[in-house]
Amino acid sequence: MKRLILMLVIAIFTGRAVAGIDWTTDPESAQQRARKENKFVLFYFTEPDYCGNCVKMKTEVLDQPEFAAFAAVNLVPVELDFPHDNPLPPEKQKVNQQLAQILHVESFPQAVILDVTGHVAGHGTYGPGGARAYIADLEKIPGMKHVDLDSIAPQEPAAEAPRQPANFVPIAPAAEVRYTQLSLKAVSGPKNRRMALINNETLMAGESARVKLLDARVLVVCKEIRDDSVLITADGKPMELKLGAH
């Protein structure tokens, strides 16, 4: 995963504070702050409307004082929402979907940890056990600082049954993808706001971007997005890319 992965996004969002944690929805400023403070970035992908485990993750882990204390020492947390009932502004939807595609997020809730260089250091989802179990798994990531939680919140009852780990597993950095041709990877969004993922870039109709191809970049202009194809120009040459074609 390249260090400049987050340069795709535009700093247009504001932060919020929850349970003593300084959350933000701006991935780029979060990465800048993480480098300055020598911390990890935690991207938290959530679908708050219909995801039961997202609610559990929030109440049992993220809103707990233990997690707030741990995050203050180690993390710059970023919340990336995918609501159904109250859709986000199109620009914000696009950024969240770009990051989900780049970081291979396919279910909710999902947390992805990036180190100060922008490399993926670990990822995980909800698991029973509360904040302490979740933090214990986070501390397995090299470079995470230990935080004494005994002074933050009361000890959990000793008679309680052993808790299942939160399944937060450190992983090796992903290998960079090398694209040998222009390909339509996905079409997403409602009919009036469709987005097309072409190689490493997500575009709406009328937008342009320099898309990776071999060891260079090609200027792609998105003309029209259909159900299973997209009309583009690549360095001025018109073409149609079909979904699933290689």
Image (cartoon, rainbow, N blue to C red):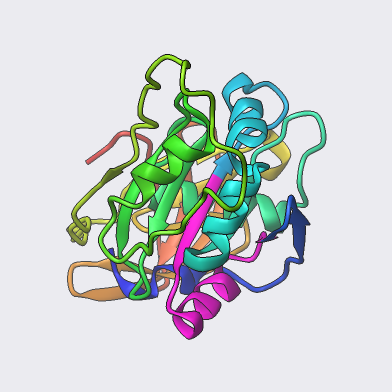
Residue 168, compared with residue 159, is above or below; it is below
Residue in the foreground of this view, choosing between 173 and 84: 173
Q: How many callouts does the rendering have?
A: 0
Q: Position of residue 116 (x, y in %)?
A: 37, 74
Q: Residue furthest right?
A: 86
Q: In which quadrant is the N terminus drawn?
A: bottom left
Q: Is residue 2 magenta?
A: no
Q: In which quadrant is the C terminus drawn?
A: top left
Residue 64, compared with residue 25, is above or below; it is above
Q: Quadrant of residue 153?
A: top right
Residue in the foreground of this view, choosing between 150 and 40: 150
Q: Position of residue 110 (x, y in %)?
A: 47, 38
Residue in the foreground of this view, choosing between 158 and 104: 158
In the image, taking residue 179 as reference, residue 71 lies left or right, namely: right
In the image, taking residue 59 as reference, residue 181 lies left or right, namely: left
Q: Residue at x 66, y 49 (%)?
A: 93
Q: Look at the image and give the residue range highlighted in magenta.
A: 23-44
Q: Is residue 24 magenta?
A: yes
Q: Position of residue 185 (x, y in %)?
A: 37, 43
Q: Residue furthest bottom?
A: 36
Q: Residue at x 40, y 22 (%)?
A: 163
Residue 178, compared with residue 53, is above or below; it is below
Q: Quadrant of residue 177?
A: bottom left
Q: Quadrant of residue 48?
A: top right
Q: Position of residue 7 (x, y in %)?
A: 48, 74
